[in-house]
């Protein structure tokens, strides 16, 4: 996979071959939260785009909303309500009227997804009705192209996204819950899991099967491609491979620093299992 592209330009009988790099506007790479003049200008441009929105609500996660309110306090008067996202509510949402994405009041016509990461914005959109107008910071690529820093235009190879990556949600009260856990090698389909699934269909019990491995795989690549500029660097400085699921990276999965990187989705799945309360839990693991 490569981000390189080749274009041909023709003028009359002459043809020129032009080599270039395919790029993507990364909101996450754009903001360093350093209070620099260029970032303050971006915040002002974003706020100017929200001024015309009637019935504006905000769905926020992470530091971006607090940063925008700091540099454009007038934004607070534009926001009519806040929609919680995730388990932790940012301090920047305090003082706003709380509403639910499932029961949107009639006075809300537009929702601003105040988040830098691509996956979280996708998850936010999934919660909202298609009848509501949605704006996110990605619009800066259209309304602020003249002031966007070069670091925000990150190389990106051809990929399958956008793809509907399911949330880690499990049904409650099943007799058996079967999970395929994050694996060392994704070269083959989880056929063992499929055999067990088909056998369970003949049994007199209620069960559910969830492929946590493929969700982890897609989350990793979404973050790598759209948020991290094409490569994931751990806090220790180790650069993870383009695809840790390839067979040659088998030993990588035993490293504590790599396990720590993938731990959030493991904890998320564990909490969901506790909530779902299956009678029996089956885990497809590698060792």
Image (cartoon, grey):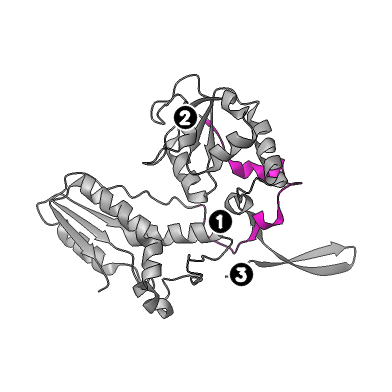
Q: Position of residue 206 (x, y in %)?
A: 15, 49
- Quarter holding the N terminus is bottom right
SS for callout 1? helix
Q: To which residue does mark 2 refer?
A: 82
Q: Is residue 266 above or below residue 73?
A: below
Residue 233 vs residue 75: left or right?
left
Looking at the rendering, the stretch of residues picked out in magenta corresponds to 133-162
- Residue lying at the far left in this picture: please name it: 204
Q: Quadrant of residue 185?
A: bottom left
Question: Is 169 rendered above or below residue 251?
Answer: above
Identify the residue at horizontal 58%, vertical 40% (top origin): 67
Q: Residue at x 50, y 57 (%)?
A: 223
Residues at marks 3 and 1, CA–CA distance in whole angstroms: 15 Å
At x 71%, y 56%, the residue is 150
Work out whether mark 1 precedes mark 2 in sequence or the reverse, and give the earlier one: 2
Name the side, left or right, on which 156 lies relative to 37. Answer: left
Outermost residue to the bottom: 248
Give neighbour class at mark 1: few <14, some 14-19, many 20+ (Cα, 10 Å).
Answer: many
Q: Secondary structure at mark 3?
A: loop
Circle nearer the N terminus (3, 1): 3
Q: Position of residue 152 (x, y in %)?
A: 65, 54
Q: Nearer the viewer, mark 2 or mark 3?
A: 2
Q: Residues within 10 Å of mark 3 (few under 14, many from 20)?
A: few
Residue 143 falls within the magenta-colored stretch? yes
Label 1: which residue?
Answer: 226
x and y percent of residue 42 in the render?
68, 42
Q: How many marks?
A: 3
Image coordinates of residue 119 in percent, x first then y, are: 48, 50
Q: Which label's residue is closer to the chain start, 2 or 3? A: 3
Tell me the number on the disc at residue 2. 3
Residue 78 magenta: no
The correct choice, above or below, for 201 with respect to 40 in the image is: below
């Amino acid at each position: 996979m490569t981000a390189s592209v080749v274009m041909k330009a023709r003028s009359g009988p002459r043809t020129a071959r032009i080599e270039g790099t395919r790029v993507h506007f990364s909101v996450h790479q754009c903001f360093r939260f350093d209070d620099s003049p260029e970032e303050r200008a971006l915040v002002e441009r974003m706020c100017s785009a929200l001024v015309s929105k009637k019935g504006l609500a905000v769905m926020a996660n992470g530091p971006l909303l607090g940063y925008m309110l700091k540099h454009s306090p007038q934004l607070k008067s534009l926001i009519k309500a806040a929609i919680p996202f995730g388990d932790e509510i940012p301090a920047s949402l305090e003082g706003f009227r709380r509403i639910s994405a499932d029961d949107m009041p009639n006075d809300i016509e537009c929702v601003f997804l105040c988040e830098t990461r691509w996956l979280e914005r996708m998850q936010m959109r999934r919660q909202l009705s298609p009848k509501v107008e949605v704006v996110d910071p990605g619009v800066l690529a259209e309304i602020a192209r003249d002031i966007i820093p070069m670091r925000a235009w990150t190389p990106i190879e051809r990929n399958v996204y956008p793809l509907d990556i399911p949330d880690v949600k499990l049904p409650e009260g099943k007799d058996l819950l079967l999970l395929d856990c994050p694996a060392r090698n994704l070269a083959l389909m989880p056929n063992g899991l499929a055999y067990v699934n088909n056998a369970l269909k003949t049994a007199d019990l209620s069960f559910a099967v969830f492929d946590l491995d493929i969700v982890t795989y897609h989350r990793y690549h979404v973050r790598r491609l759209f948020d991290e500029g094409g490569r994931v660097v751990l806090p220790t400085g180790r650069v993870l491979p383009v695809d840790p699921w390839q067979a040659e990276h088998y030993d990588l999965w035993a490293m504590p620093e790599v396990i720590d990187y993938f731990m959030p989705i493991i904890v998320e799945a564990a909490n969901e299992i506790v909530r779902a309360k299956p009678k029996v839990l089956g885990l497809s693991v590698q060792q």
